[in-house]
Amino acid sequence: MEIRLVDQANKYIPEPGNTKRDSYRFGLMKKAVFEESERLYGKDVCWLTKKESMGLVVSHIYASAEALRNYDNDAAYDPNNALLLLPGNPDQFFDKCKMTFDQNGYPIFNDNDQSSFVSEVTKNQYRIDKAIMNPERCKYMRIHNKWFEEKNHQSI
């Protein structure tokens, strides 16, 4: 019999895991995400808008606190479980599940959201490039998609 803790932690360990981040492992994750941006774009840019900015945010797709609570430490620090986004609207819309992405990197918003950010994204046809939306990121994005659907009462 094989027991994989990452898949069955809640069954065998009833108490939620500690959600405090390991700063060293998170630092390694951030470094890998920025290196991916430099490799693909030649510089650090927001993966949605392709704009350079100080203070780009490494934004978890599958929230790190949730992953740690579920004893999924590998997911919490996996560079594929992150997007590099501008601080402000891109990061906040994604973090608050007001925006998610389909498997091709196209943004999805709440049907009732009429904000200027939604208009900007639509007008400029912003999206996450296919090179970023690798199979591992798509796996994590399906989790984010589910949270988006639950929060917005909207199927995607």
Image (spheres, rainbow, N blue to C red):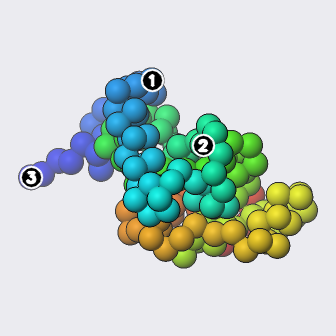
Q: Answer left or right for 52 relative to 140.
A: right
Counting from the top left corner in percent of width and height, residue 36 is at 41, 55
Query: Where does the image place residue 101, in percent across and percent down from the top left?
Result: 61, 66
* Side of 78 relative to 110 (left or right): left
Residue position for label 3: 1
Q: Could you tell me how many numbered marks the image carries?
A: 3
The answer to whether residue 96 of the structure is visible from this angle is: no
Q: Residue furthest left?
A: 1
Mark 3 and mark 2 residues within 8 Å of each other at the beta carbon: no
Q: Which mark is residue 12?
A: none
Residue drawn at point x = 89 percent, y = 57 percent: 115
* Residue at 12% in and 51% down: 2
Query: Is residue 118 or residue 145 the one in the foreground?
Result: 118
Residue assigned mark 2: 56
* First of labels 3, 1 by sequence position: 3
Distance of label 1 from label 2 (alpha carbons): 22 Å
The residue closer to the viewer here, 17 or 129, is: 129
The residue indicated by pointer 1 is 20
